[in-house]
Amino acid sequence: MKYLIAIIGILVVFGLTYIASNNKKNIRYRPLIIMIVLQAILAFVLLNTTAGAWLIGGFSTIFNHLLGYAHQGTDFVFGGFAYKEGSTPFFISVLMPIVFISALIGILQYFKILPFIIRYIGLVLSKINGMGKLESYNAVASAILGQSEVFISVKKQIGMLPKHRLYTLCASAMSTVSMSIVGSYMVMLQPRYVVTALVLNLFGGFIIASLINPYRVTPEEDILEVQEEERQSFFEMLGEYIMDGFKVAITVAAMLIGFVALIAMINGLFDLIFHITFQELLGYVFAPVAFIMGIPWSEAVTSGSLMATKLVSNEFVAMLDLGKHTELSARTIGIVSVFLVSFANFSSIGIISGAVKGLNEKKGNEVAKFGLKLLYGATMVSVLSAIIAGLFL
């Protein structure tokens, strides 16, 4: 039964994306089929094989060690009370490690290890997805550098990009998550679901972009020029990345305070007037989407509420809420977890358009105009990834 629902779910996602397509006649179906098959193979390997368990275990172990090192720094600053069992503040245990991970990314950038990896993985992917080298590079870079920082690395080309190529770059940035924040996710979700979502979203972004925004890149256009960062001394660079990580942690904390408080207030008002909370109401709206993702109808409303919470606020708020729903089955938790691992929410429209506008005002305004379509496509990516993962849970 779950296979039938998954097939229906994939067809629904394709249909909803096809309806919103900019150029239906230009869609190339062969790369789409190849990437769907690749998604299925990768999901099976990661979730159902010994090799996949070993890979995820290795990835998780690395991040556990990194989080342990980060905890030593925060424990020193916060005077030893930071990690007392049962009383660890969320800001310290989940958000502060971002500072350390950001510093590591800076070091790997400085010694040109990350640029090398990103560039060549992107080139390989461009042979699979039928897109340009720039689009493929940007998708990999977004998953490592983050949704705003990635545009700095291609700022030479931003001003020359036509609208359709700019859309694809922005869609990749919204569909993935940055490596600096992955450790925080692993504190709240099982690592196997985080890693699976990262891989599936990468290909899912190409699939949905190929449907919603199909085009062909000519050999003359298929040029990749990555902007070299201005050379700094090692400690200048390190200080800058540490402060960038701290700004991200503070920004996420501020967003959480605001969104959690607003949702609590709105829930209270809805409960007072309609005798149903706002999140419960949204749960009924999103329940059909949860069902086609493979979630039983008995759990679809609760799951739909979590999905909607992520969309209207951010993934952190939804992940925190997911931890409270111990009544959900393990399979449902896995499917919802995969859905939650992305930057597809309303606030990301402002973040991405602001990042592009900082480099080129005209292009930033273009991004703002197709912002809702960006969010629509990125949400379809999350739904598709969750459907594929659900096949093997």
Image: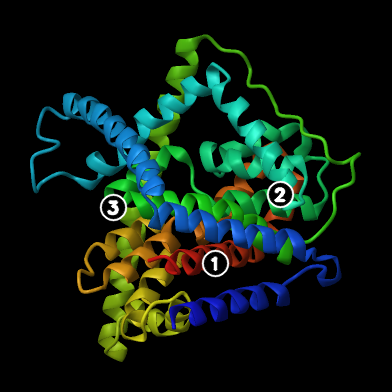
Mark 1–mark 3 distance (CA, rounded to whole Å): 22 Å
Residue 150 against residue 242 in the figure, above or below: below
Image-based side of 79 in relation to 333, left or right: left
Q: Residue at x 56, y 12 (%)?
A: 232
Q: Residue at x 60, y 79 (%)?
A: 12
Label 1: which secondary element: helix
Disc 3 vs disc 2: Cβ atoms closer than 8 Å? Answer: no
Q: x, y (%) of residue 100? A: 35, 28
Question: What residue is disc 2 on?
Answer: 128
Q: x, y (%) of residue 370? A: 70, 61
Mark 3–mark 2 distance (CA, rounded to whole Å): 33 Å
Query: For residue 342, which numbered disc appears in the image?
Result: none
Image-based side of 257 in relation to 88, left or right: right
Question: What residue is disc 1 on?
Answer: 384
Question: What residue is disc 3 on?
Answer: 188
Q: Amino acid at mark 2?
A: Ile
Residue 125 sits in which quadrant?
top right
Q: Amino acid at mark 3?
A: Met
Give the mark nearest the N terminus, 3 or 2: 2
